[in-house]
Amino acid sequence: MQYSSRTRLVTDQMQRAQCYRNVLRHALDLLPGDVCKSDQWCMLAEELACSKHYNIIYLIYRHKEYG
């Protein structure tokens, strides 16, 4: 896939990473609490998981022609 700009590439990567963190958060919510507190992998996953929402706004500069 070719991107028109690095900005679009980076925002797509950020969106994908946030999706993975949300999936991880939901999966952890399905586990019993005592398992998450005693397992090292669950504790690491807790640090990485996130359910926040981010808004990305694209600002496009258009050069005005002066006459």
Image (cartoon, grey):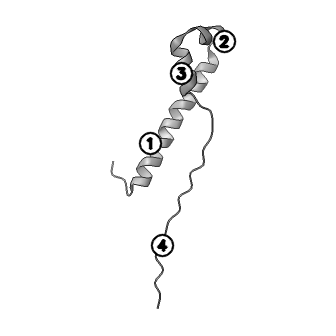
Q: Of the residues shown, which amino acid type is indicated by label 4?
A: Arg
Closer to the chain start, of discs 1 and 3, is: 1
Closer to the chain start, of discs 2 and 3, is: 2
Name above or below for residue 67 compared with residue 24. below
Q: Residue furthest left?
A: 2
Q: Which residue matches tag 3?
A: 45
Q: Which residue matches tag 1?
A: 13
Closer to the chain start, of discs 1 and 2, is: 1
Q: Of the residues shown, which amino acid type is indicated by label 2?
A: Gly
Percent x, y for residue 54? 60, 44
Q: What's the distance in space between the residues labelled 4 and 1, CA to CA?
A: 25 Å
Q: What's the distance in space between the residues labelled 2 and 4, CA to CA?
A: 52 Å
Name above or below for residue 35 compared with residue 44. above
Q: Of the residues shown, which amino acid type is indicated by label 1?
A: Gln
Closer to the chain start, of discs 4 and 1, is: 1
Q: Which residue matches tag 2?
A: 33
Callout 4 secondary element: loop
Name above or below for residue 44 compared with residue 19. above
Percent x, y for residue 31? 62, 14
